[in-house]
Amino acid sequence: MTNRENFLSLLRRTGYESVPVEFSLCPFLIERMRKELGVEDYQEYFQFPWRRVEDIKLVNHDVEQYRRFYLRPLAEGADIDTWGVGHEKSPNSMHMTYMRHPLENAEDMEDFLDYPFPDYAHGNNSHQKKQVEEIKKRDLIALGDMQTTIWETAWYLRGMENLFCDMMAEEETAVFLFDKVLETSKIRARSYAEAGVDVLFFGDDIGMQHTIMMSEELYCSWIKPRLKELVDMVKEINPEILIFYHSCGFVEPFIPHLIEAGIDVLNPIQSECMDFKEICRKYGDRISFHGTIGTQTVMPFGTPQEVKKAVWDNLDAAGKKGGLFVAPTHILEPEVPLENILAYVEACRTYRK
């Protein structure tokens, strides 16, 4: 099989010949890998199976316009993202930030209607088809990345507590905000799908370490119908696109709903929260998986042999048909030894069904 054939067959659970590798490094580990191993581009060096296609590029989008929505000014050096969400730097983390919510103090529909949401409908997507073609020519999978898709984008703007209160009270502002985020997501997803990507990666964290973030009733009322509408639109354009969905934490009660919404691959099956073997046994005939190797446990604190065993055990559980793109469950932080990263790669390269 070619790389593309192997990857697609693996995730469609129709068998595979080799185990692809994939992980994300924090800046500290990127620099350490460069200095100690001479690796400049770890995606190329370790032969990741996919490459990302750039999103629609916004035109004349000035993020400074969002400062007026913060009654308490953002801290010095804070970044403002595309949606206007403020990110104040944390002294205790290399990549996590203290998030500020521009619609936190909005009081009525007029405040929401006054907000300048990013205008992807009039953005520039001329680069996408060319990037897809170039990626596929290299026998790689073209990936469109739209994580933080509906729920997270909405609460980043409004604040989680405020948005939960709005949802429970069935405020029209919550309906407006979710629909506006969905509308924008559909514009972006349509552009990726029409450009010919193989994979679209959606996602919203809907789980916590030991429980779900909201009730199933609330999820099925507000999030699931909009996610399904988004997936249905993509599948109508191209039924062959694989839809990945990310949520950290414990999400087992939501898995049947995600399957019903049309999700093909669930990421990351966080090993500290769920037993992959049990999840695979229950749902592995209807959905595939990406991740499963713990970044709170075995990757930072296990031995290289324990890392290999975790990889091999999970691949064994998935079986010969495939259905598992095995990988660390989240970004690898400074405490992860390079030896464990190399052990993960070796385990994938040497696995025999």
Image: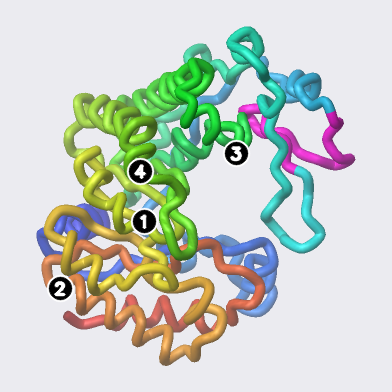
The residue that label 2 is drawn on is 319
Q: Is residue 138 magenta?
A: no
Quadrant in the picture for the C terminus: bottom left
- The span picked out in magenta is 72-87
Mark drawn on residue 20? none
Amino acid type indicated by mark 1: Val
Q: Kindly identify the residue that appears in the image at 68 percent across and 29 percent down.
A: 104
Secondary structure under badge 1? Answer: loop
Kindly report which numbered mark, 3 or 2, lies closer to the viewer in this rendering. Answer: 3
Secondary structure under badge 2? Answer: loop
Kindly report which numbered mark, 3 or 4, lies closer to the viewer in this rendering. Answer: 3
Amino acid type indicated by mark 2: Gly
Kindly report the distance in space between the C-alpha atoms of the residues bearing marks 1 and 4: 27 Å
Q: Kindly identify the residue that appears in the image at 19 percent across and 71 percent down.
A: 318
Q: Sequence-wise, which precedes: disc 3 or disc 2?
A: 3
Q: Sequence-wise, which precedes: disc 2 or disc 1?
A: 1
Q: Residues within 10 Å of mark 4 (few under 14, many from 20)?
A: many
Q: Estimate the x, y position of residue 103 in percent, counting from the top left.
A: 66, 25
Q: Sequence-wise, which precedes: disc 4 or disc 2?
A: 4
Quadrant in the picture for the N terminus: bottom left
Is the C-beta separation of discs 4 and 2 under 8 Å? no
* Colouring rule applied to residues: rainbow
Q: Sequence-wise, which precedes: disc 1 or disc 4?
A: 4
Is the C-beta separation of discs 3 and 2 under 8 Å? no
Left or right of 241, for residue 181: right
Of residues 167 and 192, the one nearer the viewer is 167
Q: Main secondary structure of the magenta part?
A: loop
The residue that label 4 is drawn on is 142
Kindly report the distance in space between the C-alpha atoms of the residues bearing marks 4 and 2: 26 Å
The residue that label 1 is drawn on is 251
Q: Estimate the x, y position of residue 161 in percent, counting from the top left.
A: 60, 39
